[in-house]
Image (spheres, grey):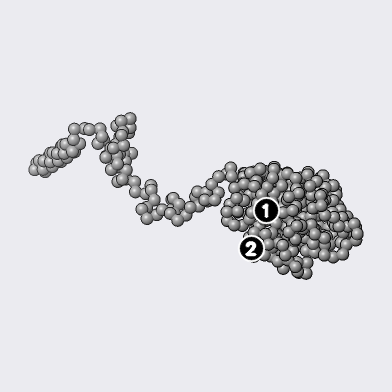
Amino acid sequence: MNFRKLTFCMILLLLGAGMVFWACAKDDGGDGDPAHKTGDDDDGLPAPDDDDDSGDTGDDDDDDDVTDDDDTGWHPPDDDDSWHPPDDDDSWHPPDDDTDDDADDDDDDLSYPNDPMDEGPYVAGQKNLTYPDAGTGLNKTLMAYYPSQDNGTSVDVQEGRRPIVLIHAGEGIKKEVYASYARHLATWGYAALIFENHVRSEVKLSDAVTGIIDWLATLVGGDTAPLGPGIDLGKLGAVGHGLGGKIIYHASLDEPRLRVACALDPDDAKPDVPIPPGDYFSMLDGPMALVDIATMHVGSGQGGDCVDEDENFEQFYLLSPKPSIEINILGAGYTAFLDNPNCGTACADCTAGTANHLHVKDLARRYVTAFFNVHLRGLSAYSQWITGTGIQEDEVNGDVTSQHKE
């Protein structure tokens, strides 16, 4: 009997404890606010149905607190800037000297007037080529420079066939000392050919120029590398130094394929060596007035030691028809135009002058390149360097004097 009573009391105690626990749990739930309800998949954030963004102004402090408390790894640590360019690394934006894609396009077609003293946009290839010399009947070698993308194997023709510039060496001077002119012109898109000829007949020298043009004509359109597939005989110009300048002008009288011509310190004097009767001619006795193509005469302000003043570039300019340009590089001597002013016995009576010969060459290459760009290719923007603001700046700097007639 006592055992039954004891069991009944224990059951009552357990039921009472359960009722108390249930009552406490119910009281802890508050007034039943649904924001506090949780389920098996509750992450502690407000219930989705109660998160209306339509009225969110971005100033909700509760939302900010939730983000800061629950997300500590979504952004880089304060001491790690690897997600953005370092302060001293500007590689993420275009370099200062290449911020305009259109300018690059202009460089490629040369319509954008960069300073022609600088190298052009092309890579120069070089080969020595053998040609039949009409003046002597012998095979001779010339140096060819041209734009190339295959280490000189062929002329780069991606933008069409290339204009041609012949470079005639001065009397008794080797062609190698004009290499910088040909290489420079090649970077500007020209096929530049340097040749020398030391026969004692000026008439034969002039015939040799025509012979080279005839030889080039046999190559045009053919597959003879490197020049054949890549040259345009319809755009042919020439530049000569000293006697070479005189010969170029004379050749143009009977050579319609020669479209423009210029000279570096041209000289009308008779050669110092004996020549057969009738093999000498003077351009200043009248023929220069018949040269009906664009000409430019770049002279040495101190060239009187080698070229007499009554036979120099100034006299060539005076007789030249329009259009023509005269540029006098002050302080330059006859040999200052060469890559190596010490050109041996051929220049024994000539000097490089007082001007820095490297600067003289830079100026000469600028003017020659600009001249051909304008008068052979029709790129009028480059006229500033030979008749406009560019050469005016050179005059202000005391480098040159100039004049022109159009």
Residue nearest the viewer, comparing 27 with 271: 271
Q: Residue, x 59% and y 57% (percent of image)?
A: 398
Residue 331 in the image: state x and y as whole percent: 65, 62
Residue 79 in the image: state x and y as whole percent: 37, 55
The N terminus sits in image quarter:
top left
The residue that disc 2 covers is 355
* SS for dot 2: loop
78 sits to left or right of 195: left
Circle number at residue 327: 1
Going from N to C along the chain, the mark reached first, 2 or 1, is 1
| Residue 309 occupies quadrant | bottom right
* SS for dot 1: strand
- Examine the rendered structure and indicate whether residue 274 appears above or below residue 190: below
Q: 10 Å neighbourhood of mark 2: few (<14), some, or many (≥20)?
A: some
Residue nearest the viewer, comparing 339 with 265: 265
Note whether residue 324 is visible: yes
The C terminus sits in image quarter:
top right
Q: Residue, x 85% and y 59% (percent of image)?
A: 140
| Residue 310 occupies quadrant | bottom right
Residue 134 in the image: state x and y as whole percent: 88, 55
- Examine the rendered structure and indicate whether residue 232 appears above or below residue 398: above
32 sits to left or right of 261: left
Residue nearest the viewer, comparing 54 with 168: 168
